[in-house]
Image (spheres, rainbow, N blue to C red):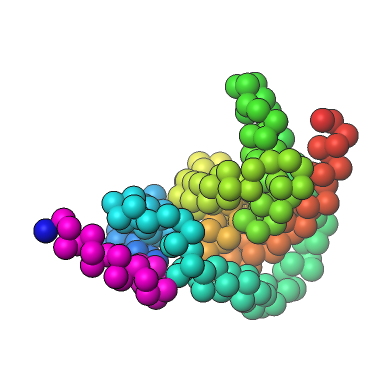
Amino acid sequence: MTRDFDQLWVYLSANPLLHLTLTLVAFHIGMFIYRRAGLNPLLNPVMIAVGLVVAVLTMTGTTYQSYFEGAQFVHFLLGPATVALAIPLYRQIEKIRQSGFAILVSIIAGSATASASAVAIAWVLGGTNEALVSLATKSVTAPVAMGISEQLGGLPSLTAVLVIITGILGASLGPYLLDLLRIKSWAARGLAIGTASHGIGTARAIQVNEVAGAFSGLAMGLNALATAILLPIAWYWFF
């Protein structure tokens, strides 16, 4: 029975659509559970999908390279999906204009705090230089974070994992923390989520409130820009 399954998997894995289908099915299962739980942020659909995909790849002995060959179309769509965030941003353009200075200060403070706190904790715990660099960009969207990490001597693969974990944790626990701090403004909540947990957090913010989604998308983009400019300067200055 096991041998037959192995042979079947070898046959199916030769089809590039297999891993794309696996990714989509895993995400739909995650969304189904998420909706049945009343959009409970602790049951983030991305977290569930990642767990399911990892479990299948582990059980079948499939390498990441083989998986990515079939699922890279989803990776390609990250670009258009990011650009599409301009739509809710455009709808809230007047509110953004009115809060321009506050947004700028918030992004710079949030970017600095996200990087400095992670690096400081890892340094105290004895992290290597590669680990510190990889951690510094954890709150930036993955393509930018990996590029910065590589340029500063970090490990892009480790950075990618840390970015995903940060996004899932921010989307899952961020709303509870903001409630605990009694932050009611949707604009402020969106800025916080977008700065701390980039695309995954922004997807969650859009589901909850349009204003929060717009400000979260803006924060995600500006945080990536601020980190790409300021982090290399700070890194070479202090390290």
Q: Residue at x 70, y 46 (%)?
A: 149
Determine whether, in the image, residue 164 is placed left or right of residue 30: right
Determine whether, in the image, residue 4 is placed left or right of residue 168: left
Q: Point out the image quarter for the C terminus.
A: top right
Determine whether, in the image, residue 21 is placed left or right of residue 144: left
Q: Point out the image quarter for the N terminus.
A: bottom left
Q: Is residue 178 above or below residue 239?
A: below
Which residues are drawn in magenta? 2-22
Residue found at the far left of this picture: 1
Give the camera-side residue of 42 and 189.
Answer: 42
Q: What x and y, as percent, mark residue 2?
A: 16, 56
Q: What x and y, as percent, mark residue 77?
A: 56, 74
Q: What x and y, as percent, mark residue 108?
A: 78, 48
Asked whether residue 105 is in view, the answer is no
Asked whether residue 70 is in view, the answer is yes
Q: Is residue 175 above or below residue 213?
A: above
